[in-house]
């Protein structure tokens, strides 16, 4: 059973990893891990990013992520997975998403981690606003490049 949380608080990677490992018992042969951070890339106009602000619809977002996690558990025969996504205002350098997957073998854990992050990026209902150091802000539009990356999972 997947652990899915949408939260404002920072996450503890070590604590979450320990919980997933304990739940899997001795059958786990590999764990995949992805930690996404708010990065400081300047935009096309040279504005420095100060923070991302993430919004969501409570209930709907968790349900969507749980469905994505269930698809990963079935597709890759996972022994467990953890998906944590933060909301609210997150300054540059803060953790935004944590994906952990546990499988009998490393390949399944690694592939499941990539699948989850690709699908979260394109199918989880979040709205992101970029807040710049000059006080301006703008909403992030969906990118076709992200859809193209996620589409690879539709073929398998």
Image (spheres, rainbow, N blue to C red):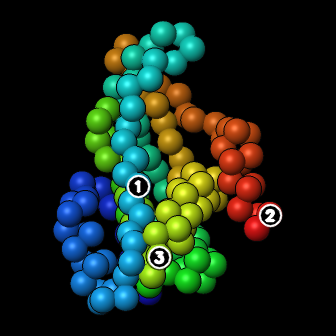
Q: Residue furthest right?
A: 155
* Residue shown at 24% from the left, 54% from the top: 10
Tell me the distance, in whole angstroms, between the alpha carbons under discs 2 and 3. 22 Å
Instruction: Name the N-terminal-most of marks 2 and 3.
Output: 3
Q: Position of residue 40 (x, y in %)?
A: 38, 25
The Cα atoms of the two marked residues, 3 and 1, are separated by 17 Å
Residue furthest to the top in view is: 46
Q: Nearer the viewer, residue 7 or 83?
A: 83
- Disc nearer the start of the sequence (3/1): 1
Q: Is residue 70 visible?
A: no
Q: Secondary structure at mark 1?
A: strand
In the image, is residue 20 above or below residue 49?
below
CA separation in Å, label 1 and label 2: 23 Å
Q: Circle 1 sits on which residue?
A: 34
Quick one: SS at disc 2?
helix
Q: Quadrant of the N terminus?
A: bottom left
Quick one: quadrant of the C terminus? bottom right
Residue 155 - label: 2
The residue singled out by tag 3 in the image is 105
- Determine whether 132 is above or below 107 in the image: above
Determine the secondary structure under disc 3.
loop
Q: Residue at x 57, y 35 (%)?
A: 140
Q: Nearer the viewer, residue 31 or 96?
A: 31
């Amino acid at each position: 059973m997947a652990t899915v949380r949408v939260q404002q608080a920072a996450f503890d990677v070590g604590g979450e990893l320990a919980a997933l490992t304990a739940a899997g018992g001795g059958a786990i042969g590999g764990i995949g891990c992805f930690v996404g951070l708010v990065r400081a890339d300047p935009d096309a106009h040279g504005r420095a990013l100060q923070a991302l602000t993430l919004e969501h619809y409570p209930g709907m977002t968790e349900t969507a992520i749980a469905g994505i996690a269930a698809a990963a558990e079935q597709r890759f025969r996972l022994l467990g997975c953890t998906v944590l996504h933060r909301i609210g205002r997150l300054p540059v350098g803060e953790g935004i998403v944590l994906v952990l997957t546990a499988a009998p073998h490393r390949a399944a854990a690694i592939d499941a981690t990539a699948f989850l992050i690709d699908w979260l990026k394109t199918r989880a209902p979040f709205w992101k606003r970029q807040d710049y150091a000059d006080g301006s802000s703008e909403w992030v539009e969906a990118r076709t490049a992200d859809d193209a990356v996620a589409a690879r999972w539709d073929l398998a």
